[in-house]
Amino acid sequence: MGKQKSPFRLKSEFKPAGDQPKAIRKLLENLRKGVKEQILLGVTGSGKTFSLANVIALWGKPTLVMVHNKILAAQLYREFKEFFPDNAVEYFVSYYDYYRPEAYIPEKDLYIEKDASINDILEKYRHSATKSVLERRDVIVVASVSAIYGLGAPENYIKLRLQLHKGMVISHGKLLKRLVEMGYERNDYALKRATFSVKGDAIEIIPSHSDEEIIRIEFWDDEIDRITRLSLLNREVIEDDIEHIVIWPATHYLAPRPTVEQALKEIEKDLIERVAWFKKQGKEVEAQRLFQRTSHDIEMIRELGTCKGIENYSRYFDGRKPGEPPFTLLDYFPEDFLLIIDESHQTIPQIRAMYEGDRSRKLKLVEYGWRLPSALDNRPLKFEEFLKKLNTVIYVSATPGDWEIERVCSQGRV
């Protein structure tokens, strides 16, 4: 069987120079030999990003590049975007402009409610990233350590997608209902990302991954007659007479209705058990607090499909058992993906520290009845869990830490 052609097309006026050709060749040789972990110790010439771009282009596998902060991620995203203008280069970082986590300080009897400001542009990029990872092989995602935080089960995300094709029999009302189930909001006046509007016999959708296009679905009775992509800016036709299109959910944290109903039963069961436990301990205040707060959340989820702090119930919707790792961006990638950890001497310690910091804060919330114990499972990956999800890794650092050096045999040091 011949070698599969790479789907990546690297475009650059430069050619590898200095130490780069040797480094590129060695990294690829090791990948082909099945070496799972390598270190790129730094190369001279026009930069490490160009060397890595050459490796990605020649290796031809979906790639995740992880870095330790948003600024570096944005810089690498721009560089890879220039090298691969015809491929899917995506950006995945935390969507918060401002974030104050929920917390409880027992010494002061002070409850601090979660307060956050979500950046819609960053949320758009996150949806674009998961869409590309699930639809394409020629994908590079540049991500911060946000990649190890819970994202919702990819199985639910895939189940809830809406596949439409020309000639499909579906009523106007049923399509509108499906869009609402997927987290889209109706807005007939100001179209924005993850909304839809009704215009006569047509439904216009702005998908979750874009704020630049409209997907227009035209009907003839209960049959889709025409699918068109329009520019949101001027309504010019981008693509006409589309045969098939996929609309992805408006949020990563949704589940099909039967899953939601089952989740609510489990939440109610755990609530009864936890309230009984508090009462047995003589902690009536905690029991009452937990019962009131959780009952309100259950009612909101039942009526609206969501509630404030719904991520604290993610384990139930994902079908995970207590203590099982959350689904993250890593789970959206196919098994043969390539992971590049840039500035690994800083990124690895950051990944290590995430779990403990998150857990210590949530333990207080659980201990004093602000949250069910399931809140502890809304968390980043433990370092050991992170390692189990990896396939092939290239650590990139001019000054690698002892951990990377010990992990990688001499053959894998480039």
Image (cartoon, rainbow, N blue to C red):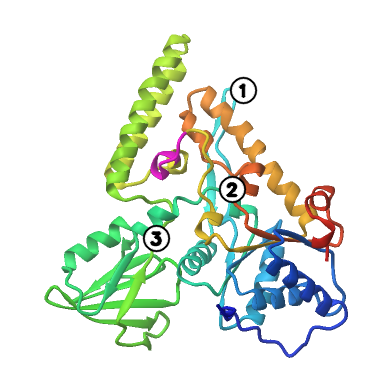
Quick check: marks 1 and 3 in contact, CB under 8 Å? no
Question: Which residues, given as a range, are shown in magenta?
Answer: 315-321
Distance CA(mark 1)–CA(mark 2): 22 Å
Q: At 18% across and 69% down in the image, what residue appears? A: 170
Q: Position of residue 258 (x, y in %)?
A: 27, 45
Tell me: residue 197, above or below residue 112.
Answer: below
Q: Secondary structure at mark 1?
A: helix
Q: Is 311 within the magenta? A: no
Q: At 56% across and 83% down in the image, what residue appears? A: 86
Of the numbered discs 1 and 3, the one sitting upstream in the chain is 1
Q: Secondary structure at mark 2?
A: strand
Q: Position of residue 272 (x, y in %)?
A: 35, 22
Q: For mark 3, what is the residue?
A: 250
Classify residue 185 as left or right of residue 308.
Answer: left
Q: Position of residue 374 (x, y in %)?
A: 47, 33
Q: Which mark is drawn over residue 99?
A: 2
Tag 1: residue type? Lys
Classify residue 146 as left or right of residue 274.
Answer: right
